[in-house]
Image (spheres, helix red, strand yellow):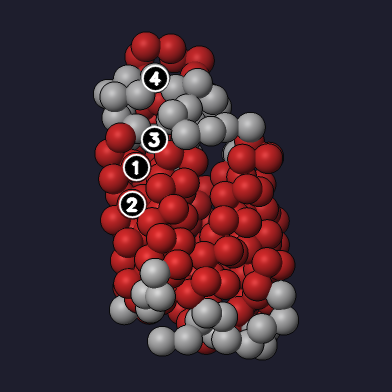
Amino acid sequence: MAFDAQTATAWITASEAAVKADEARLTGLDAAIGDGDHGANMARGLAAALTNIAERAPSTPGDVLVAAGRGIVAKTGGASGPLYGSAFRRAGKALGDTTSASADEVGAALEAALTAIKGLGGANEGDKTMIDALAPAVAAFQAVAADGGPLAAAAAAAADGAEQGLAATVPMQARKGRASYLGPRSVGHEDPGAASTALILRALAEVVA
């Protein structure tokens, strides 16, 4: 399957549905180590992303992701809005004007999203943040793409990598974000940002399968 504007829109649509269905769990995770609003914020932000895409009717996958990012920034509270909004916008800009992105190009876009989040939030792997899901996902995606694997295989590897990264956040002590204030009490919980990242990467895998 080509990663075109229709596929990019389907990805955001699937992400919104996945986050909405899991909103209570995401909120519960955030209630344990954060502000307790991550599920609601993400559901609101992705709904706004879809509205912005519908209003702008973008014709390239890059423009779809930029529109999604702008919608998220406008409507998502907390740290999630700037982080996810910047990620989608940077990914969209990385795709440029192409109307149908290759697996390698999508991998580069995901890497651009990761770089944007690292630059804005100042977190790295091991800090118990969304980076712990996104970084292994990007690495897994790019490894498959570099081997000549199709988009579907690369996206499936990325989703698996994100879910493994999410599981790895449980024994971590948070070093960034609101959860870091808890110190050792942050141990034993999944990071909510990593959880929503895993949902979004799994949504991509399902759309391009």
Does the image show residue 205? no
Query: At x 33% / y 52%, what residue is drawn?
Result: 161
- Please name the amino acid that badge 3 sits on: Asp
- Please name the amino acid that badge 2 sits on: Gly
CA distance separating discs 3 and 1:
10 Å
The residue that mark 3 highlights is 191
Query: At x 39% / y 69%, what residue is drawn?
Result: 147
Provide residue 92's location: percent of width, then percent of height: 65, 68
Q: Are marks 4 and 1 in contact (CB under 8 Å)?
A: no
Q: Are marks 3 and 2 in contact (CB under 8 Å)?
A: no
Front label number (3 vs 1): 1
Kindly identify which numbered label has been placed on residue 165: 1
Which residue is nearer to you in this view: 43 or 105? 105
The residue that mark 4 highlights is 173
Q: In the picture provided, is 115 more to the left or to the right than 144? A: right
Q: Earlier in the sequence, mark 3 or mark 1?
A: 1
Assess disc 2: are there few (<14), some (14-19) or many (≥20) residues with their C-alpha within 10 Å of its C-alpha: many
Front label number (2 vs 4): 2
CA distance separating discs 2 and 4:
20 Å
Q: Earlier in the sequence, mark 3 or mark 2?
A: 2
Q: Are marks 1 and 2 in contact (CB under 8 Å)?
A: yes
Circle 3 SS class: loop
CA distance separating discs 3 and 4:
10 Å
Does the image show residue 70? yes
Q: Is residue 89 above or below residue 61?
A: above
Kindly identify which numbered label has been placed on residue 105: none
- Please name the amino acid that badge 1 sits on: Gly
Query: At x 52% / y 71%, what residue is drawn?
Result: 104
Q: Earlier in the sequence, mark 2 or mark 4?
A: 2
The residue that mark 2 highlights is 161
- Please name the amino acid that badge 4 sits on: Gln
